[in-house]
Amino acid sequence: MGLQSCTKLSPFSIFNLPTTLNRFSNRFHHRLRSPPPLLVRALSSSTAAAPQPPTAAISDDAKVAQWKAAIDFKWIRDNKDAVAANIRARNSNANLQLVLELYDNMLNLQKVRLQEVERLRAERNVVANKMKAKLESSERQKLIEEGKNLKDVLVSLEEDLLKLTDELQQEAQCVPNMTHPDAPVGGEDCSTVRKVVGKPREFGFAIKDHVQLGKDLDIIDFDAASEVSGSKFYYLKNEAVLLEMGLVNWAVSEAMKRGFTPLTTPEIVRSSIVEKCGFQPRGNNTQVYSIVGSDQCLIGTAEIPVGGIHMDSILAEASLPLKYVAFSHCFRTEAGAAGTATRGLYRVHQFSKVEMFVLCRPEESDSFHEELISIEEDLFSSLGLHFNTLDMATEDLGAPAYRKFDVEAWMPGLGRYGEISSASNCTDYQSRRLGIRYRPGLSTPSKKGKGSSGVTQFVHTLNATACAVPRMLVCLLENYQQEDGTVIVPEPLRPFVGGLEVIDYKYR
Amino acid sequence: MGLQSCTKLSPFSIFNLPTTLNRFSYRFHHHLRSPPPLLVRALSSSSTAAAPQPPTAAISDDTKVAQWKAAIDFKWIRDNKEAVAANIRTRNSNANLQLVLELYDNMLNLQKEVERLRAERNVVANKMKAKLEPSERQKLIEEGKNLKDVLVSLEEDLLKLTDELQQEAQCVPNMTHPDAPVGGEDCSTVRKVVGKPREFGFAIKDHVQLGKDLDIIDFDAASEVSGSKFYYLKNEAVLLEMGLVNWAVSEVMKSGFTPLTTPEIVRSSIVQKCGFQPRGSNTQVYSIVGSDQCLIGTAEIPVGGIHMDSILAEASLPLKYVAFSHCFRTEAGAAGTATRGLYRVHQFSKVEMFVLCRPEESDSFHEELISIEEDLFSSLGLHFKTLDMATEDLGAPAYRKFDVEAWMPGLGRYGEISSASNCTDYQSRRLGIRYRPGPSTPSKKGKGSSGVTQFVHTLNATACAVPRMLVCLLENYQQEDGTVVVPEPLRPFVGGLEVIDYKYR
């Protein structure tokens, strides 16, 4: 593709006047087959109550029913050296020692409880038998008290066990996902380059950055947004609006061609869902906006509401993989980002994003990871962008990611590469928290007996950015600018922006 | 147009495979002309709130944020108090006009007093310039000091009084168009009827059932993830949403509107200036923890804010914007009213038209806006009524309001799909949006400068509120076999999709 010296035609005809460049006869329901297996939506005990309507303020200390991640403690204990090494490689502050201790204590306490339950039952029988005889009232009273004491011991044990379980959960939830053996170990400078596509364009003239282009072409307004909302907000105007809508439409349609089911999602979710996906809504430098008077948050990515769709469910194996492409607005506080690259559209509080999300069987997640990054690379190549695909080093992997590939595209106006996309394989980290299982072998979970394998497994989940609009705008504006200050629209996008070929000045 | 018994073609080819139904050679920058006049962005003292706090610490509701001042014409209110009182009555507003007039009077008196004392202080100061006996000088110094003390105290009172006056006066609703029907909601009159209810020869479904059967809307998963009144759109509904937005924006652009996308998080003061109440007990507005920011319930709010505290050149008017945004509403206090399915939701996509114009033009722009809306909805084959809303149903900002209610057969009633309001100068007096009549650039002094600035009039109108449009389209275009036909004007925007079909048989 690349940058063409395009003849400047009438910039904008009509929005719905695209040319049909390629004609796939993609049938919408390409997976026409027997009815999808029924999903069993089991309500786990950890499902929080309906979110409070935003009337009264909830303090941060309010005790919301804590949810439990289905963490495999036994596996951690049996593989503690590997887990410890992983924690080190990732520079995580998880306390494995404490987790193992608490786990041990919990097992012991469970044993003790079992014994006490037995003892109580035995004692109760004895007492019950004794009480059948004729007794002095004082003796009777003593027996009753004995019985009560035993019960109290048990109640106290249960309380301790509950507390211990909570503590264990709290510590264990900090343990990051294991790491792919091929992932480079170390800090961000250890990330390796998997692929390079294209090379930086050579400009024969002094170039502008996207902020200047946005101003000169009257397509981005930061100043008004600063008054109305604060810094890192913006209005898009004129052709930038068409570009945003066009980019979203194009990304969604490209993903649909590859078998992804399109979705739009809620952008307000319960905070527990945010946590289950591996984010921290309540940290000091949290990226997450919270809503006053409720336990709800704004999403920073569609990964969160999409991850939540199948929570607390058992899927039939035949329904996997589930491949979603979701469009949403995303909101991020960017707290703690001061000083880092923040100019213009590069780091903003609100943006549109098209996100791919896959739920699959464990043995397939590696290959889906390859598929996702491959789709991303195709998308960005087709727009003529120059970029590197990086295999992220262990210290740069978020807690949920087993392996992560980032795409950094060349942004000539900023004079450096900037991340435009990220593809993570979260294996079972999220699914153990969201409670997403599948039953191997069965085509419908409700049919008992016939070919039932019994034990459910956790699915693997993956997520990948198809298109983060502001960063794509940075790339397109800066890479496709011409000497006269206009900007060319790359061909694949033109059908989605009504045939618009050039972004021109609004007056001369 | 109407409902066609469509042959069912392959439902969905490819997204970017639209047919080009009409070929306007619409040039994008239709307003190709001399450079737009420079906007003078004056920072009024009242609008300079500090940068919004980053969401780290909690702000209690009692926190005193610097209060902004609406440029209310108190003199006009006083001179027209009967009309204002009558208006308050017909709108069933709880504004306290009596109090406003009292406070205004007190404020004027206090101002006079303050000025008088200032003058006296100047006299004293002048006297001190002359050669004086020490005892005389001492006396004058004392006089001056006393005057200063009284002044300081009076100035504090004046500040407080001004705040009180503002608080009361901001409650006074906009005046009302003489033709607007007076009374409660049953007094709203029908301006126009387009089409009639379709006659179905079969038992119809509502959009919730259709959404489930066609696997295009999921309420249950959203209820778990977010709570009630949230939803996921799936499959063709996603295409329809994106298509509706694209179509609405492009249609409205043809009428000379500038497309925009807007922030959806704004400072709460902007919300208030547009006439909404972020902090009431049944507020429609979501607030963000640890800041003075809110989520917008409509793009009217961030668009209204674009030109706040500005003086526009007359030649730049009218400014016509079409803005696409997501909107968030708590719907607190809506329990019991119609809430089924997509009819009342916490989050939705909307395309909104917003106009800033000269006062003498707002009536005609109101007509233009409602006319655009009626064209949009007619072209989709919807049956609807346009209502002239009665006084008790006008929001405080609206001088006049036209609502469009479309027939929703599955719900068995008419439902509001759009609203067009002329807010005259209500919002602009709060947002501080003025224009300078006469010359083409405000910066050219002397040459034909008229001097006195005026407040613009603002109008807003819904081009497309996606969930309610989905209700209309799904329920009206359903077929006996449970599939749904996509009306022709939308097909180019949904990749040629003609029918929403079952996902499996």
Image (tube, coloured by chain):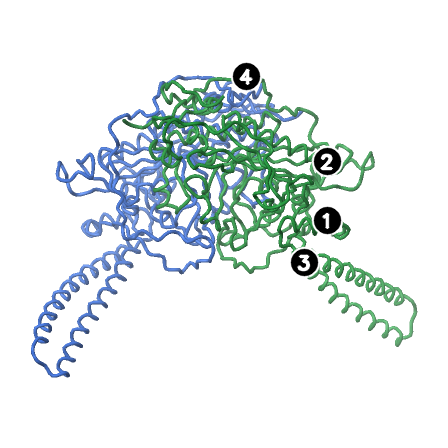
Chain colours: A blue, B green
Q: Position of residue B33 (x, y in %)?
A: 69, 25
Query: Which-is-in-front pick, marks 4 and 2?
Result: 2
Work out whether residue B33 or residue B189 is closer to the camera in this orientation and state it.
Answer: B189
**Which of the two labelled residues, at mark 2 and mark 3, occupies the earlier sequence position?**
3
- According to the picture, the residue beneath numbered tag 1 turns out to be B83
- According to the picture, the residue beneath numbered tag 4 turns out to be B23
Q: Is residue A413 left or right of residue A386?
A: right
Q: Position of residue A318 (x, y in %)?
A: 22, 33
What's the residue type where badge 4 is placed? Arg
Classify the position of the C terminus of chain B by image quarter.
Answer: top left
Q: Position of residue B355 (x, y in %)?
A: 63, 35
**Marks 2/1 same chain:** yes
Q: CA distance from mark 3 to mark 1?
A: 24 Å
What's the residue type where badge 2 is placed? Glu
Quarter-of-image position of residue B375: top right
Q: Is residue B61 left or right of residue A390?
A: right
